[in-house]
Amino acid sequence: MKGGREKICAKLSSAFLRKWWIVAAIALLFVILGIIVAIFFMTWVNLVVQHQIVLKNGSQAFGWWRKPPVTPRISIYVYNVTNADDFLNNGSKPIVEELGPYVYTEAWERMNVTFNDNGTVSYNLQKLYFFSEELSVGSEDDVVVVPNIPMLSATSQSKHAARFLRLAMASIMDILKIKPFVEVSVGQLLWGYEDPLLKLAKDVVPKEQKLPYEEFGLMYNKNRTSPDTLTVFTGATDITKFGLINKWNGMSHYSHWLTDECNSLLASDGSIFPPGITPNTTLYIFDKDLCRRLPLKFQKEVERKDGVPAYRFSPPLDVFANADENPENMCFCPHGPPCAPSGFFNVSLCQFDSPVLLSFPHFYLADDTYRTALEGISPPDPEKHRLYLDVQPMMGTALAARARVQINLAVSQVVDIKQVATFPDIIFPILWFEEAVDGLPEEITNLMRLANQVPPVAHASITGVLFALGGVLLIIAVWRLVRGANRLSSLQLATGHIGPQQSKDVQMNNVNRH
């Protein structure tokens, strides 16, 4: 009876050991899972986020992209010339008065949205502008004196033409009573007014050379659905190109500049970017009025009131530098030196050869002599005049922006045209604007905040639980296995299933235990 009982006990002890070996295996599995989660959890989260932001019909992200739930605004500051006659007749330094802001709220919607088979989507952007009296300092009816852009563009272009053509132009301007400065309302300057030169050109210029508008205005024909068709990548086939332009009016490259890199249109429209942005990322934004894509470099991390982490990106300080200071900009000088001075970008090639130079407001990043050539313009302030964009790095969504640009006219003296014979070579500022988006609706920022805050906490919690559970089970399993092994050895000794030497070892172990 005694021997049978001991054999039963030995069998039970063996089963006990097998059970704790299984527990030990499970504990090791928990530890391995903890390691896997520690390494790959955030990668899985990023894959889920990327799947959610892909532009696809019917998704929430697509709805927000098609009709952005924001109210952008554009604030316009006009340089009103207060001594035009003195400047022309006596050679006085021009004096300007900065008027504004004249503020317009905007409504954006992507129209004619069409998904293509190659992982892209095409659309036309509708921008509607609404004048805001409460946000503005002044009225659209305010009268300003500004350079006559159509006239000064024509005279500057005629500088290298035959002399008789310049004399003929002077006679025509005499007959039409065209002067170098015009007195117009702010609304006319922006949205259009009838210009006698444009009216004349409509009648005499060959059809293939006609300008595509009959009036002149710096924002003429912009208060509508754009005829330009943009095609962007949805991210469905390549998330690294999410939101980037594939084609603009069927073209993947401009033809104005000297290299494929400078002609490239692979950029964002400024609203969405490929996810996974880091401080080493260079963002590119495209606007047809700029005639190129604009690079943006990391500036700093931004703490926002809504709790969503953001990176601020701005153009590098040498973005508009001349080729001597930034050799990469040589490609934007197709006709060779002299090119636009540092701090300016020549957009004449896509503005019907009008000598328009873009800069940042108050000639920020340009030599100060251009600002001091006029009176009335305060020194630039980077906080007020720098262009910047705040983006959420995980999702690549633009959270806030300040697009600040100044429009200037490069005026050339032409001695054969008496109307501008005393007009010096000067870069004359017309206006500057700030297009702003302050933030996204709370509904979106709440989701973004959760997407940023929950995964790291879940990552740490799940990893910690798996490691803790696996570690505790492993310690218990090892301890019980050691105890069980000792008991089994004692039973085997008692029933004679081990040899003399093994018996001595067991006895020594028992002595050591006590």
Image (tube, grey):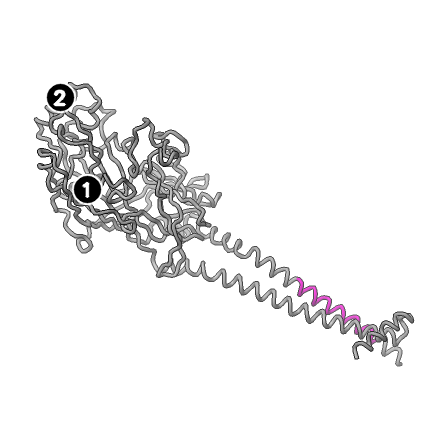
Relative depth, front residue between 178 and 368: 368
Q: Quadrant of the C terminus?
A: bottom right
* Three-letter code for the amino acid on which mark 1 is drawn: Leu
Residue 189: x, y in percent? 17, 41
User: Which residue occupies the extreme bottom position in the image?
Assistant: 1
Residue at numbered disc 2:
168
Kind of residue at badge 2: Ala
Can you give x and y, in whole percent of width and height, for residue 13 in the image?
A: 79, 73
Note whether 411 is above or below 233 in the view shown.
above
- Asked whether 45 or 262 is in front, the reply is 262
SS at circle 2: helix
Whether residue 18 is situated above or below residue 71 in the rendered picture: below
- The numbered mark, 2 or 1, whose residue comes first in the sequence reads 2
Q: Which residue is mark 1?
A: 190
Q: Where does the N terminus fall, quadrant-wise?
A: bottom right
The magenta-colored residue range is 8-28
Secondary structure under badge 1? helix
